[in-house]
Amino acid sequence: MPELETRELECFLTLCEELHFGHAAERLRVSQSRVSQLLRSLERRIGARLFERTSRRVRLTPLGERFAADLRPAYDALRRSVEQARIGARGVEGVLRVGFSGFLNERVTAAIGAFRDRHPACEVETVEHPLADPFGGVRRGEVDAAIVPAPVREADLVAGPPFSKEPQTLVVSGRHPFAGRESVSAEDLADCVLVGIAEPAPRYWRDLQVPAVTPGGRPVARGPEVSTLQEAMSVIAVGRGAMLLCAPTARYHGRPDVVFVPVTGLPDSTLTLVWHRDNEIASLRALGLALTA
């Protein structure tokens, strides 16, 4: 078997998530040419192309899709084994303050409970932060880490692997034309107005949560901007716009005057744990492992 390079595999899996060489380079903290070099090296080892690349888009080949599906569980298991060894060598104790926005679904709360059982000397406190300020609490030292929608491309923050993949739902007013439909497609988003997210959330992150175009390139109108999910639900209820939310969050914020319509053709919503690069402590790594287990 040819010698494997873990950096090549990490690059491949990151590019699978981003489907953009520049964004993958930002996450890996390397140059775009280095991403291309690592991918070419991996493709030579395998003997076939893993991505189809044009000037406008990057997508997995059928072989690339199969390889990613087979590789991800094995890579995550290897990563967890290394991290568990590091954590065991350093110890996990103290108090972790973890920020979140709006809602922690059952899978996340169960993972935090499992972490507490495994590390009884470490307590986890959860703190709600505004939707429009996903990283501020970490940077100001108000929390040790934050659970936020992925992906994250902040140079001063560490983002753990994505977890809690959930289908996306379009939240609309009960009077909206989509309210009576069983589902809508990603292309249907061009026929509605999406509520935006206000600053200080960075522009790239806001655009990822509230897409400006459909997968087919049709423009999506942008409505009023909000700072919290509570504001968003009020704006939606009076018919001023719609919003994409993962299904568990949508259910949690349910109210009689809004409707949740499943969306097809969009990638699942995922979360990630982020913390400051200057705050690399064993308990954060251990919590990240619990969330992705």
Image (tube, rainbow, N blue to C red):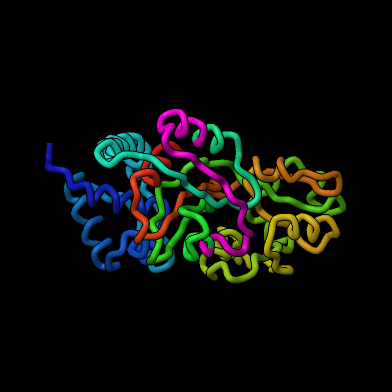
Work out whether residue 66 can be spotted.
Answer: no
In the rendered structure, the answer to whether residue 50 lies left or right of residue 149 reads left
Q: Quadrant of residue 64?
A: top left
Q: Quadrant of residue 278?
A: bottom left
In the rendered structure, the answer to whether residue 141 lies left or right of residue 190 reads left
| Image coordinates for residue 15, horizontal then vertical, percent | 36, 55
| Image coordinates for residue 233, horizontal then vertical, percent | 77, 55
Q: At x 47% / y 49%, what residue is drawn? A: 272
In the image, residue 93 above or below residue 54: above
Q: Residue 115: within the magenta?
A: yes
Q: Residue 58: within the magenta?
A: no
Total marks shown come to: 0
Q: Quadrant of residue 74?
A: top left
Q: At x 64% / y 56%, what residue is drawn? A: 187
In the image, residue 228 above or below residue 166: below
Q: At x 41% / y 33%, what residue is drawn? A: 119
What segment is highlighted magenta in the picture? 112-136
Say which of 28 and 20 sits in front.
Answer: 28
